[in-house]
Amino acid sequence: MLSKKLQRAISCVLLLSCMIFAVGAANPTQTETIDYGDGYYLVITTTGKNADTTTRAVTERYIEREARAYHGSTYIGKYTLCGTFIYDGSRSAATADDWYASSSYGYSGSSSHSGSSVKGKCTFNYAGGKTYTITMTCDKNGNMSYTE
């Protein structure tokens, strides 16, 4: 028979393990590479938080989509598109957008939201310039889809 202190310690460890697993599951990260076939490619990392806020069956979700641009082995810059969405099982809407970028070659960018989508674009001033466009869309159940 285990002592009460040992039982409590084991229970605490198990509880903390479950909490750590749940926190990791709430912030999924996905990485993918998009090759444009002309020497340019993007390495895109998507992070998000599910169910940041739930009020009266409306759930809010915040997503960041970071695109690192390359030409061959040359790193050009980074563009990050941020979007906030709400959904409730019968509808969804994009409620906010933002963007930021960095590049030693210079850049320009923008973002906007309409309906259930957030759209952003960034032009990096490397070798004549290349524009990248990213769209994030949330459906009524909180499922995300992306296009580049």
Image: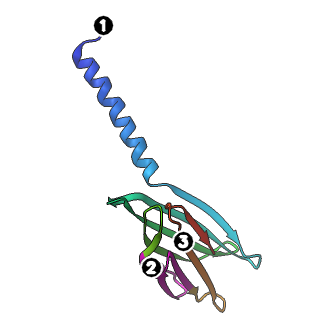
Position of the C terminus, as image quadrant, is bottom right
- Amino acid carrying label 2: it is Tyr
Examine the structure image and report whether residue 70 is included in the region drawn in magenta.
no
Callout in the foreground (2, 3): 3
Residue under the image location 58 percent in, 86 percent down: 124
Determine the image quadrant of residue 18. top left
Question: x, y (%) of residue 3?
Answer: 24, 12
Residue under the image location 58 percent in, 77 percent down: 134
Q: Is residue 31 left or right of residue 37?
A: left
Do the numbered discs 2 and 3 sit on residues whose CB atoms are within 8 Å? no
Callout in the foreground (1, 3): 3
Question: x, y (%) of residue 56?
Answer: 32, 60
Earlier along the polypeptide chain: callout 2 or callout 3? 2
Judging from the image, what secondary structure is the residue with disc 2 in? strand
> Callout 1 environment at 10 Å: few (<14), some (14 to 19), or many (20+)?
few
Judging from the image, what secondary structure is the residue with disc 3 in? strand
Residue 137's disc number: 3
User: Does residue 148 sit above or below 60 in this rendering?
Assistant: below
Q: Report the magenta residues as a range.
A: 95-122
Task: Check the image and name the residue furthest to the left.
Answer: 5
The residue that label 1 is drawn on is: 1
- Amino acid carrying label 3: it is Thr
Earlier along the polypeptide chain: callout 1 or callout 3? 1
Question: x, y (%) of residue 113?
Answer: 47, 81
Residue under the image location 31 percent in, 26 percent down: 11
Q: How far apart in space, not on screen, are marks 2 and 3 (Cα)?
A: 19 Å
Residue 100's disc number: 2
Q: How many marks on residues?
A: 3
